[in-house]
Amino acid sequence: MILSLNSCLLLAQSFWLNAIAVLRVLVFFVLWLVCWLPIALPIAKAVKWRFPQPISPAQKLPLLASLYALAPLVLWGIVALEGKGFKDYGLPWQSDLLRSFGGGLAFGSLGLLSLFLLEWRLGWVKRQLPPTESSLATESTETITAQSPVPVLPTLLTTLLIGTWISLTEELIFRGFLLTTLQSDFVPWVAATIASLIFAVLHLVWEGKENLPQLPGLFLMGLVLVLARSVDRGNLGLAWGLHAGWIWVMASLDTLGAIHYQGRVGEWVTGIGNKPLAGAMGLLFLLATGGILGLAF
């Protein structure tokens, strides 16, 4: 039995190391999906969601959490098969990684806040401060029952933690494993293009055609994050921080209901469906971010 198991492992390792990059990428995603399905099906039943019905945020969160929690374990198995470590995919657990993450987090969050500040100064969006206990005390009884104080600090901390986790998982997969694997068979710019295209298209899984207007923005976002890894000498710290900062700001503003689009310009400018990546301003923001990163490259 031991000999048979060792033989199977050696055979699997030989197949993996000799397979072309595209096949290795396909095997990873299929393996990830197959391992996730036994977990996802009971969760989907519990939250009363059936594919391909539209999915609500409350239904999506436990499914996404289980999927992303499983990803590092699947990737760890592949890393062990290759005889490598996560550092080979841009994630060395060193102090430099955290410094780069911190810099990227500040750059990403402040940059996105600057975009919304510019749109506010232009009169395209309106700031909406969340209600507090003191403000609600002056409202009528009907208003008090309809509203509740928004816990700003807990919201910011929660969205920061979620954004940090999601961005770390996605960077490890897309700018780590996927990009590194593709670069073994393709020149860097082709590998970056393919990895960014896969990153964009896979965002259709959860929201389907509603995410179509964001595809160009998601693709460009992927390219900017590839550039961030290059600027960080192959490490994922800077890309991880940038990604986390963007998620943090967007999730916080959405949860707090802090901005309201005025409709003074077309959606194609500010973002179709109030999604910045689906508008010209979001694309210009990503181009500007890439330009700044390019100056440091």
Image: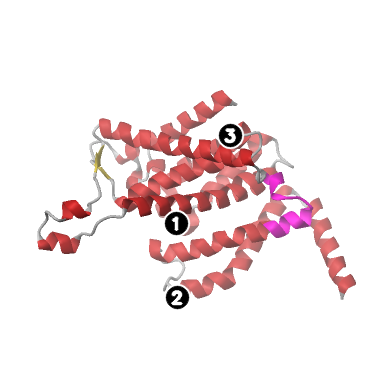
Residue found 53% across the figure and 64% down from its top: 66
Res 55 label: none
For label 1, the crowd category at 10 Å Cα-Cα, with few meaning under 14, some 14 to 19 and many 20 or more, is some
Is residue 220 positioned above or below 51 on the image? above
Is residue 160 positioned above or below 282 on the image? below
For label 3, the crowd category at 10 Å Cα-Cα, with few meaning under 14, some 14 to 19 and many 20 or more, is many
The residue closer to the viewer here, 267 or 141, is 141
Q: Earlier in the sequence, mark 1 or mark 2?
A: 2
- Residue 284 visible? The answer is yes
The amino acid type of the residue labelled 2 equals: Ala
The amino acid type of the residue labelled 3 equals: Leu
Residue located beneath label 1 in the image? 208
Residue 114, position in %: x, y?
37, 33
Spot the residue most to the right: 3
Q: Look at the image and say whether residue 96 sits in the magenta stretch.
A: no
The amino acid type of the residue labelled 1 equals: Gly
Indicate the secondary structure of the residue bearing disc 3: helix
- Quarter holding the C terminus is top right
**Magenta span of residues:** 76-89
Q: Earlier in the sequence, mark 3 or mark 1?
A: 1
Horizontal placement of 180 versus 196: left or right? right
Indicate the secondary structure of the residue bearing disc 1: helix
Res 227 label: 3
